[in-house]
Amino acid sequence: MTITTLLVANRGEIACRIFRTCRDLGVTTVAVYSDADADALHVREADLAVRLPGAAPADTYLRGDLVVAAARAAGADAVHPGYGFLSENAAFAAAVQDAGLVWVGPPVKAIELMGSKTRAKELMAGAGVPLLAPVDPATAGEDDLPLLLKAAAGGGGRGMRIVRELDALPVELLAAAAEAASAFGDGEVFAEPYVERGRHVEVQVMADAHDTVWALGTRDCSLQRRHQKVIEEAPAPGLDDALRTRLHEAAVAAARAVGYRGAGTVEFLVSADGRPYFLEMNTRLQVEHPVTEAVFGLDLVALQLRAAEGEPLPSPEPPQPSGHAVEARLYAEDPARDWQPQTGALLTLEVPEGPGLRLDTGYTGGDTIGVHYDPMIAKVIAHAPTRTEAVRLLARALERARIHGPVTNRELLVRSLRHPDFAAARLDTGFYDRHLADLTAPGTSPGDPATAALAATLAEAVRGPGAVHPTRPGGPAPARFGAWRNVPSQPQRKRYRSEPDGTEHEVAYRTPRTGVPEPYETPGPRVLTATPDHVTLEVDGVTRRFAITVHADRVHVDATDASYTFTALPRFTDPATHTAPGSLLAPMPGTVVRLAEGLAAGVTVEAGQPLIWLEAMKMEHRILAPASGTLTALHAAPGHQVEVGALLAVVQEDPAATTPVPVPVPEETA
């Protein structure tokens, strides 16, 4: 059957990416959208769109019956699930086919067989695929540690725990099962040995209905935070030919064992001594598929559509790979604060274009990053003849990007790509456990925030009182800071706070009779040009250019080597902004999902005790007691929607207790 109209049962970046291929093939596209996504990019780019009433995923994108009804209403003849949501839901795949629609995915039976990690491992053992021996938690001993607990019915880190002490095993089992049940509707959890310093290596497979199975090389996805990938590359570096061959053969055997068709990924853990172990098979397209596309010169979505139509793959053997590709996931999150997701208006998103660069995104400047979905903004991919060239190209593209709005992990990505261990391909899943503190330390970026703050000040001084700034059409810009001075030659001062690290900068400047503002300190940077949105300085004999963009009290300064975000500070501190001691505030907008057992005003709590669980953007956060003492107020209840900064509870500290103050800790992400 030829596909003419395709509904994508997904949102954001992956929906936009699938639509791109559909346009190239002449296929009409249909989007589905929640109320929160009414003006999302994937809706704007689709030919047709169908509303799924509601905002939460459970009411919209996870409602298979609504998605099938939407496909019928729009006249679609096929459904592509993308990744996440219903992409590995066998019942949904069956419902699509029962409705007479083409399912752009593997057979239902293959999804069922690989849907349970425990059953999948049994099947792979029969196919000769190398495995880690399972461990029975009921009989686990000290010799079995460390253990990795995993949800049998899902992935993405939900229900996953590392256990290093036997006494902690019962508690972690209960917590993992509860999270797995909440995320996947199935609380089954299994245990296996945790491989220290292991690498996450996977093989992309593509199969048709004519007994052809391609193994499309390897990918390394070892750089992960909370068991979710951050940087991926193809081919996986540092593997010898024998290991690559073994991985390819195991992946093909896994696909044949379940009668696979379409695109899928077989994931392995490779130990430090080079032994591979099967982890799972993802029966869908992966987030990181662009690196394989770049290296093999393929469009995997086009091949998925071709396989779904019953056509054979173009040849018995895959094309030869060429070069190296690296992908970085740009997230709205703060790595320095336990990867806390961020929300708000994405004011600007501009990534350099050029040979070897690719941007996959579900956002444009002016869109809003909300609380309901994953905080990934975009994927930036670089392809070059060698790994060194691809890594350099990607790091520079990220460094030059203009990203204004919520805090992102952009700087972490740049530092990671340039870290000596990454450059030398010393990769394993503990990379961020070891290096995160150094990678997020303030003041270690290649640029100079003090000079950037000076550029921001000079641009504001030029702007003048009551001027209309280009980024503020129809509204007044901030008043020129020095507008009230009586003696033009005397210095004026401006204070800024760097975001997100909180470092404060004070800039002194003056405006002489020439009318061109200049730094007050001498000797110092020399002002070459200064306009409301561009400043050029000569710093130690080097000319540096800065682009300045103002949004409310935020000032974004983009230089050639780094980008900065500042909050303009008032001359005097407002004492009313201080929060009462012991207050537990919501670190982000979200939903209260549960409270500690027996939690109520008047109970005694211990420092570091989890009190409230808050869920936002597919991440669950524990709000911990800041000190040992008495809970004097409780304003949170399960189901409550809260805004950032909302008062959840108050703990009155016991003066006799002297314990450090912990911070909210996010759980694993989906």
Image (tube, grey):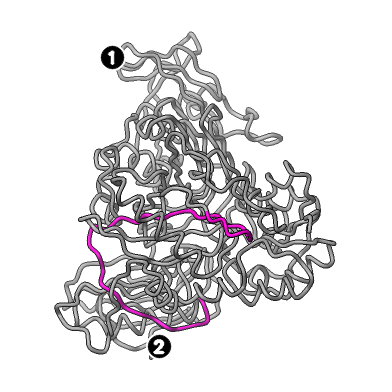
Q: Amino acid at mark 1?
A: Pro
Q: Which residue is mark 2?
A: 600
Q: Residue at x 33, y 29 (%)?
A: 448
Instruction: Assign a secondary structure to mark 1.
Output: loop
Q: Is residue 339 left or right of residue 616?
A: left
The segment highlighted magenta reads 184-213
Q: Nearer the viewer, residue 106 or 442?
A: 106
For disc 1, the marked residue is 523
Residue at (63% x, 43% y) in the render: 364
How many labels, in total?
Answer: 2
On the picture, is 27 further left or further right than 662? right
Which type of secondary structure does the marked residue at label 2 adopt?
loop
Q: Residue at x 67, y 36 (%)?
A: 475
Identify the residue at horizontal 78%, vertical 65% (top origin).
71
Answer whether residue 440 is visible to the viewer in this image.
Answer: no
Looking at the picture, how far across and down is residue 646, in whole percent?
A: 49, 68
Q: Is residue 330 shown to the viewer in this render?
A: yes
The N terminus lies in which quarter of the figure?
A: bottom right
Tell me the mark number nearer the camera, choosing from 2 and 1: 2
Q: Give residue 235's position: percent from left, percent from top.
A: 40, 43
Q: In the rendered structure, which amino acid carries the disc numbered 2? A: Ala
Instruction: Give the camera-side residue of 435 and 189.
Output: 189
In the picture provided, is 465 more to the left or to the right than 493? right
Q: Quadrant of residue 106?
A: bottom right
